[in-house]
Image (cartoon, helix red, strand yellow):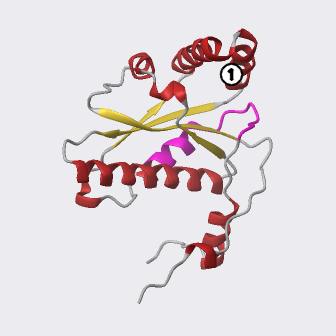
Amino acid sequence: MTEFLPTPEQAAELLRSRRTINKFQTKLPPRELIEQAVELARWAPNHRMTQPWRFYLLGEQAKHSIIELNTDLVATQKGEAAADVRRRRWQDIPGWLVVTCKRSEDTLQAQEDYAACCCAVHNITLYLWSHGIGCKWTTGAVTRDPRFYQRLGINAESEELVSLLWYGYPDQSPQTKRKPVQDILFALE
């Protein structure tokens, strides 16, 4: 290979350091980086090369529509005060990307396609993290509401949501712990 490849240590550090970001700076990352991340998402493992992923980069109008839908849902469930807090928090999230998976009538293919789309989202998060951009992968209640699809013009009969992916420069990067390998790796003879 003639291209630069990270060392195993660099790759391991990228994997270990990536965090889910809940609080972002207001600056929107360059669109070119998002497009590069989506380009790399296409290289995720994909059984039978169905390439089931679809990516929707939300502009201000689409973002506002989803924020208002979520505000209505939260107000109904938790009241106006909680809805206002959520609205203000969501308005501060700079970047929004929706990832869907083409539906398949074949149950096994549908499962494999969804897994491939999850790998694609992870490719995006790792690439963006390598540029100092954090993400939060969410599938909250608003994404399960049929109006979410309608407001974005996504056909819910042919695509299912994998991720509402928020992105931006981290304002805070949380610490986390993982279970030890010996607690999750089982050798079978």
Disc 1 crowd rating (10 Å Cα; few below 14, some 14-19, many 20+) is few
- The region drawn magenta spans 22-38
Q: Is residue 28 magenta?
A: yes
Residue type highlighted by circle 1: Gln
Left or right position of 60 against 53? right
**Image point (70%, 61%), residue name:** 17
For residue 95, above or below residue 187: above
Residue 96 visible in the shown view: yes
Residue 184: quadrant of the picture: bottom right
For residue 44, above or below residue 90: below
Of all residues, the one furthest to the bottom in this rendering is: 189
Residue 23: quadrant of the picture: top right
**Image point (67%, 30%), residue name:** 93
Left or right position of 14 against 188? right
Residue 24 location (% of width, % of height): 74, 37
For residue 64, above or below residue 6: above
- Is label 1 in a helix, a strand or a loop? helix
Residue 6 location (% of width, % of height): 59, 73
Closer to us: 51 or 1: 51
Numbered label tally: 1
Q: Which residue is mark 1?
A: 91
Closer to us: 34 or 185: 185
Of all residues, the one furthest to the left in this rendering is: 106
Closer to us: 170 or 90: 90
**Image point (78%, 56%), residue name:** 175
Q: Which quadrant, please, contains the C terminus?
A: bottom left
Residue 118 location (% of width, % of height): 44, 51
**Image point (43%, 78%), residue name:** 1
Residue 58 visible in the shown view: no
